[in-house]
Amino acid sequence: MSAQNRKAKQLIILSGKGGTGKTSISAAFAHLNAAHANSHPMVFVDADVDAANLSLVLEPESLEPKEFWGGSLAEIDPGKCINCGACSPVCRYDAIFPDPKNDQVQWIDPIACDGCAACVYACPEGAISMVRQQEGNWFQSNTSFGTLFHAELFPGRENSGKLVTLIKQQARLYAEDIQSQCVVIDGPPGIGCPVISACAGTDLGLIVTEPSLMGLHDLKRVLGTLRHFHVPAVVCVNKADIYPEGTRAIREFAAVEGLDLIGEIPYDEKIPRAMIEGKPVTVLFPDSPAAKAIQEVWHKTIDLLNLQED
Amino acid sequence: MKLIISAQGSSLESQVDRRFGRCMWLILFDTETDQWEAFQNPGTSQSGGAGVAAAQFVVDNKADVVCSGDFGPNASRAFQAANVEMRHFAENITTVQEAIDQFKQDMLLK
Amino acid sequence: MQIAVASGKGGTGKTTIATSLALSLASLAKVRYFDCDVEAPNGHLFLKPEFTESTPAVIRIPQIQTEKCTACGRCVEVCEFHALAKVRKNILVFPQLCHGCGSCTWNCPENAIVEVPNPIGTIERGMALENMEFFRGLLTISEPMPTPIIRQLKKRMQPQPNTINIYDAPPGASCSVVETLRGVDFALLVTEPTPFGLHDLKQMLGILSDMQIPSGVVINRDGIGDDSLEETLREYRIPVLLRVPFDRKLAENLAAGRTLVDVYPQYGDILRELYQQITEIVGGKTK
């Protein structure tokens, strides 16, 4: 048994604010890694499960969808309901009211139901049961840049955090199987449950921000989140030339916080162009200003991850 | 002494799982009788609180020691309150059998 | 009238449109602005409210009264979220897993559980430009659940005649967006004409169809992409109510915290006209 460290490093790419360019950059990273002569296989995860876009630019061949079963929702059996009204007062989510199709029985709105089961215990007739729900699908797909683990949460569902944890775990196990040194996770916007699941246990957080007041405000929030969960962080600024004063403010903030600013990527319409062609910008427009800047960010990132050369 | 080990499969040759809360299997091993049994982790199917569900299982089975890689804050808290000792796999451990052998030689990390 | 501004994809310009829509309508009616993106709220950067009130947003979590607790474990059994564990003769509570549903409290045979407030964020209220009431929620860093804060924020909604409530929704298409949309009359979807914008918009259309909320689209940064978005909208019969062309000067000004109507005042009339279209669509639905 080899004494080599078998645990793959994990990189999480976050932003706080949506739309800063995480996914375009993640796709470029996938290509840059695969294109390098001495590259090691990497595994990719799209953790933005309710708005999953990475697969749109990596041309995946999906293996079969696998079902994701999340929590349960309460359902009333109209045959057993005696309309006693014991259930609705215990529901804190305003999910129970007379059935629009039959006002002699109560009905639970699946969109509002939180799955707490308080009504199940309140019902004297045993008319309410918890029913497990399929809340989405997940996929392990082959792409020309490596294997991608991604998912589609059904619209409006809860448990995105659990789905993120699931695909991260699958990616990690697969990475161990193929002796991959790194898992790259394209994260969701925000700072809540799916972000927390995405960044848990990762080795490095790359924050992609933009030079607006909004970008800086949300950079602070996501940085606070990464620090809370003990993930070392670095930052890069995308669309940096749109508002130079904003980029300056981010540089100053980074200096004060002891946060490494590892790149500034100019606004480049090649990025949406590449998106429309369904490929990473570094594939289609390798000499474009954005592609070159992203390459710099990539090199600094893999240095920081300290991946071992063979 | 009763030991519980987080694993990816249901036999002693299975790979260990370094993540406690969402591991697929929990292997219960009795060091006095050398008997063992594999249980599906109740934590894997939970929407949240996997660590708590898995820890509850360990506590309900009256284990003395639990072995994994990373327990997470919730399971850790439950085990501290329950006085169940947490031990960590060293980097080179790959199978459940190896973890058991290392435990018997008191080589698992605290 | 309750209007939510949503998108699916992040960064398409929800806050840009929502804030300028609010400013444009302030001359027609009383406008109340609710920033429901409690994880990363940005509305205040444009509307510059003076906050007058800040209250903690709380979830009610169980506290075990140990003198009455027999450690029967009933609470652990009924909790769907594993927020309770029975360990020796004690019951442990895990606040970050708790949904505040109250089930354990009602089910305890010894009445040994009381509920105590667990703060997960704040709800703030203030007065913004154009004498507009401004509400927002802010999730505390490391807290996982935004939805209870959005729910509490919306309890302030008080629909009144001649009042327009505007809700700026979070990005994505999961439960926090649904909570923002509940009970609104119309969803104004702000998107961009790219494959990512289109993909995520379809998720939103799925939600809106389930919730039976009419919608219309604002195509922001028009010109950076292609026609696939508009083709799809025609198929789904979702009206395009406005196109805002991509414009670097605008982008720079927005980055600096100036609003769309500051930079191009003609959008005041355009957005008031958009509102008229919304009222017609909503009126048409209720016939």
Image: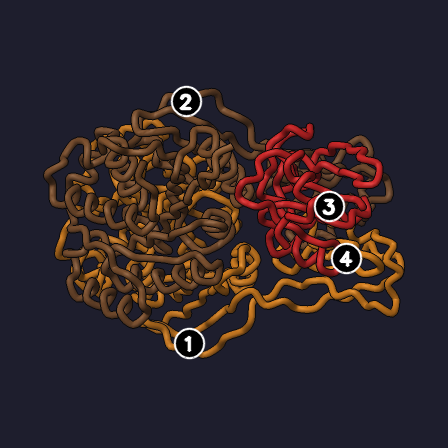
Chain colours: A brown, B red, C orange
Q: Marks 4 and 3, Cα distance to the nearest angstrom?
A: 28 Å
Query: Tag 4, which chain?
Result: B
Residue at screen point 21% across, 29% down: A277
Tag 4–tag 3 contact (CB < 8 Å): no
Question: SS for tag 1?
Answer: strand
Specify whether disc 4 shares its chain with disc 3: no
Q: Secondary structure at mark 2?
A: strand
**Quadrant of the rendering where the C terminus of chain A is positioned:** top left
Circle 3: element type: loop
Closest to the camera, between mark 2 and mark 3, is 2
Residue at 32% x, 33% y is A40
Q: Give the amino acid at mark 4.
A: Ala
Subunit ID for the residue under disc 2: A
Quarter-of-image position of residue C240: top left
Q: Amino acid at mark 2?
A: Ser
Q: Nearer the viewer, mark 4 or mark 2?
A: 4
> Quadrant location of residue A254?
bottom left
Q: CA distance from mark 2 to mark 3?
A: 36 Å
- Horizontally, residue A218 falls left or right of residue C66, namely left
Give the CA separation, mark 4 to mark 2: 45 Å
Nearer to us: label 1 or label 2: 2
Classify C277 as above or below B38: below
- Res. C257 visible in picture: no
Residue in the image at 10% along x and 38% along y = A287
Which residue is under mark 1?
C51
Q: Amino acid at mark 3?
A: Ala
Above or below residue B7? Residue A216 is below
Mark 3 crowd level (few <14, some 14–19, many ≥20, 10 Å Cα): many
Tell me if I can see residue C159 in this picture: yes
Of all chains, the one bearing label 1 is: C
